[in-house]
Amino acid sequence: MSEEKKVTRRTLLMTIGFVFNGIVAAAITVPVIGYLLSPVKKKGAYNQWISLGSLSQFPEGQTRLTEFINPFKNPQDGETAKTPCWVRRTGADKFQVFAINCAHLGCPVRWFPQSELFMCPCHGGVYYADGERASGPPERGLFTYDYKLVNNELQINAGLMPTLADQARLVTITGKGKSPCLG
Amino acid sequence: MSRIKKLYNWFEMRLQLEAPVKEAVLHPVPKSTASWWYVFGSAAMTLLMLQIATGILLALVYVPSGSEAWKSLDMLNHQLQLGWFLRAMHGWGSNFMVAVVLIHMAQVFIFGAYKFPRELTWILGVFLLLMTLGMAFTGQVLRFDQDAYWGLGIGASIASRVPLIGGPLVNLMLGGPFIGGATLSRFFALHVFVIPGAMLVFTGLHVWMVLKLGINEWPMPGRVVRRNTYIQEYNELAHKDGVPFVPDAFWKDLFFSAAILAAVAICAFVFGPYGPSGQPDPTIIQTAPKPDFFFLWLYAVLSYLPPNLETPFVLIAPVIGICILLALPLVAGEGEKSWHRRPVAVLVLVTVAVSWATFTHLATFTPWSPIMDAWSGDPVPPKLVHSETPLERQGAVVFQAKQCRNCHSVDGVGGQRGPALDTVATRLTEDQLIRQVLQGGGNMPAYGKTLSPPEVTALVHFLETLKPANQPGAVDASRELQKAQNAAPQAAQP
């Protein structure tokens, strides 16, 4: 056994060969990690101001379904580049723009003007007209988009699919709205 | 020498496969294992081959692009000869494969097959189960229809709950900021290259170990596995009371595999392909997305969890479950194999099976989901309102128009999210009804802001009529007493 362990010229060359392969492999693969991680971007990089159209489309006191084309769309996205959202106009220049995705697991919520509730068809999450959680499994109210009014148009800051990961943090840091912990 | 024999020899001289193949097929197995209980593993492998063959055939036509995938499936269904049948075979093959893999797992668990020296065979099997489920989920995504779109939304929502890295995880899963073409492309890569590649390697090693270590013997009470004696005992059993694997045990594998393939083909022929359902247009929100059969139990669990337990459960429970499965052979590698001496194992298996079946059954009719069109589609049955006062009838209108029916059934029709209201007047007094309507609670939204006082009065009067004919309504004892006291002096006066 002890003889076999001896380093000969050939075993040394083989070891160097392994190391050489390792170095080349690392040099090639390490940058590829960047390729794999390329969809991950900094907070806010996936949001842009998008117009939802003229203010006149949204009568005061009503909640309407509208849609926008995602600013980060690619040709192969087809119909999925479109995203729906609910626009609630509460005053001349006061709006609430709710994401379509239920805060529970992202299913599309539907608005019922008669009972003034948003209901989710998946697991029965229900929200009041102002987006607050009413009942069911969601731990918080509906996700909202930031909005601004420019030249008589309603614009929202959108692009990233709203999920608990980005919106929950938004709520706690800025102190806007109720803490999600309060349900 | 015949020509065929010559040809065979020409190849054999170069390939030299005869000896190892003979060794593998003729190796002795304990006689008791030539049983119909030992056919599920080979059936799972047959189904894997079927999935690969049908998958390749579908890939000749399928376009993994967000804008084209649905259309290419539609073309497979309607325009290409037998395209529908291949899709159906692949879809039903997937169902059968998950089922057979689970049955195989239950069988080797209850037969104690994971014990020494077959721990690694079981561990690779656990990964094979996870990959089978991964194939089922990614396959559902490739069907890029409405269910696939919103199913991805559910996946992203679960990923977003991971602390700290939730956001980046969502972007990695979706391949960008939203569900779209990039998402489909990466699920295609997973479904067609990554997972099947890993599955083939794992299946190869899994089968290799079965051949090398020998098939698990039929467990007998009292025949205890011990690390230092087991291998010798097994070899004695296989050689003294053994039969060659081929053909003594193998013919049953062949019969069962053929039967399973026939069952897949019959299901495919009779029930046809899965979807695609509606086009993946997110602006069509009139949809109630539902996962495929083998994820229905998860869909049910997610709706029953209390909100504050959901994130911990969704993130921690699968990790614990997988760790338990992986650790099982390392912790319980010795001891009794027979189910007669392993009551806990039997109980665990039965509990898991019953819970799984219960949740799956519940998810087929989703009692937790509001029925979104019950208010407009299912009128209040006339027999409930035929002799009511105008105020009560007005209440029935409010009941209908304010979507109460979406969550509450009357006469067996309507949602099951809230309790059925056929006998609500026997349970709740007038005051309790008013409070419940105005303030909600117990998982009901509050209607105080959306109903006017006359509407509440009418609604509650209608609800008070909902009781069996011969049963009194619920009454508030103190108010009844007050009424009686008010009435008593009047009665005494004249």
Image (spheres, coloured by chain):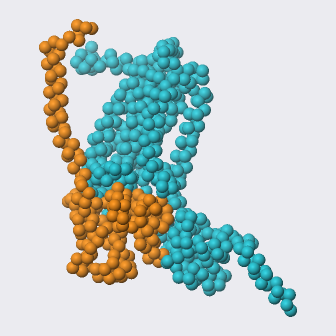
Residue B75 found in image quarter: bottom left
The single residue placed furthest to the bottom in the displayed view is: B494
| Chain shown in cyan | B
Q: Is residue B138 left or right of residue B388?
A: left
Residue at 39% x, 81% y: name it: A61
Residue at 44% x, 37% y: name it: B323
Judging depth in this view, the residue of A105 and B80 nearest the camera is A105
The reply to whether residue B441 is visible in this rendering is yes
Q: Quadrant of the C terminus of chain B?
A: bottom right
Q: Is residue B316 left or right of residue B411?
A: left
Q: Percent x, y for residue B188?
A: 28, 48
Residue at 59% x, 37% y: name it: B347
Residue at 48% x, 75% y: name it: A115
Q: Percent x, y for residue B187?
A: 30, 48
| Chain shown in orange | A
Q: Percent x, y for residue B222?
A: 60, 21
Q: Quadrant of the N terminus of chain B?
A: top left
The reply to whether residue B469 is visible in this rendering is no
Residue B208 versus residue A87 in the image, above or below:
above
Q: How many marks?
A: 0
Residue B492 versus residue A112 in the image, above or below:
below
Residue B454 versus residue A179 in the image, above or below:
below
Q: Percent x, y for residue B319?
A: 43, 41
Residue B219 found in image quarter: top right
